[in-house]
Amino acid sequence: MKLAIVTAYPPSKVTLTEYGYHLVKHFRLQDQVTEIVLITDKTAEPKDLNFEEKGCKITVKEAWSFNSYRNIFKINKAIFQTKPDAVLFNLQFLKFGDKKVPAALGLLLPFICKMKGIPTISLLHNILEKVDLANAGFTNNKLLQKIYNFIGTTLTRFVLASDIVAVTISKYVTTLQEKYKANNIELVPHGAFETPPEPDYDLPKGPKQVMAFGKFGTYKKVEILIEAVELIRQRTSEDIEIVIAGTDSPNTPGYLESMAEKYSHVSQLRFTGYVAEEDVPRIFGDSAVVVFPYTSTTGSSGVLHQAGSYGKAVSLPDLGDLSILVREEGYRGEFFEPESVDSLAEAVENILTNDAYRRSLGKSNYQAACSLPMSTITEMYINHFNDIKMKKEGTLLESENS
């Protein structure tokens, strides 16, 4: 199989970059995949293809740019030139831009591929029906929210033209089946990016690091985390460092800089900026607890799966997709009330002050992550592509016989 994967890819800063990296890393080790055509966004630096294990051939086609109106034509051209046997789209609604038209045009591509007869799977990380448009940074205007929902419904129908639409949460399957009467929805779990050898769950010497990881400023807010740790410091003797790992959300440029200025008086507060792929194990490995300071959710959480891979305790809000994911995949953590500093402080304190409990959470999360490695996830996609091929061949045979 010559497989095309349309995705953002490191060193890109576009959403789902990291997931794209791990898709490629594990698809290239699948026996049936003879070549990967990586149709990705343009970056000044070369793509990160320095994998340790030998794998299949990878052809890179830098075909698109964030917010470009020409993406639909450039990606379509790359697919035409490379002639893949199958295409996998790694998607969410702001994949190709945070401006309305480029974002919408990019989501027409699965429909175009299907019309060309190319076996097509679209991995949809979020669905608009489950996104809080205000918290996610789209708009607070009620009329505009209705317009966005109408446009989102229309674009979802184009994505649903794929042979298969894969989603990572069971609730998404039900929603899409009921609203759109779709019968091509498949649950394919997010999967754990890495399954390193089981850690010893010890912490490095020095302050206990309370870490949040991601793109901040919309529904991911660092204020609540910083203020919660300040509360803990007031009532315990714990030596704590706050680590904010990541960058601004594209919708909120300058957010982290403003937070660094606002909380410049807070001791042991560190903003790491962008975290390169090779630095991810260290960032997680040094952490005592990984915190999810979210006010809403927009799909499955790659950060949760990473935390599990490195055997980390987590503290997370009991809301939406995140709580569903935890219960479905066997993760454990200390829950807190969204937007409540007191509740978050209590949750983090419960972990930091009880080493046995912290280790227990870490072990449970490591086991949950190991149960769904990316090698298993990519194998599921291969099986789905084989099913699509068999159905197409069966349909063709019936047509010839008739």
Image (cartoon, helix red, strand yellow):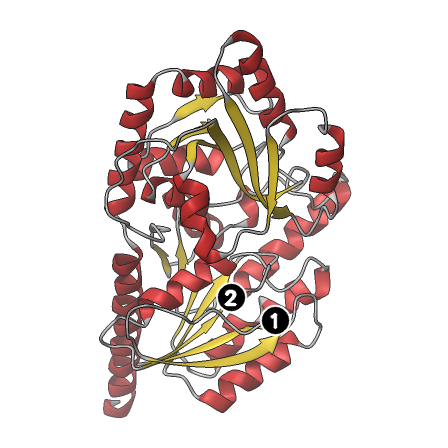
How crowded pointer 2 is (Cα within 10 Å; few <14, some 14-19, many 20+) is rated as: many
Q: Secondary structure at mark 2?
A: loop
**Residue 341 % position (x, y):** 59, 18
Question: Mark 2 or mark 1, which is nearer the start of the sequence?
Answer: 2
Q: Secondary structure at mark 1?
A: loop
Judge whether residue 54 can be spotted in this image: yes
Q: Eyeballing the image, is 343 above or below 172?
A: above
User: What residue do we see at 61% from left, 57% from top?
Assistant: 94
Which amino acid is tagged 1? Thr
Question: Which residue, given by chain and number where applicable, does mark 2 sit on?
Answer: 9
Quadrant where the C terminus lies? bottom left
Q: Which mark is residue 272?
A: none
Give the farthest residue toward the top: 235
**Residue 265 % position (x, y):** 72, 24
Question: Which residue, given by chain and number where applicable, does mark 1 sit on?
Answer: 43
Relative depth, front residue between 87 and 14? 14
Q: Eyeballing the image, is 315 above or below 369?
A: above
Q: For residue 360, what is the image quadrant?
A: top left
Q: Eyeballing the image, is 294 above or below 239?
A: below
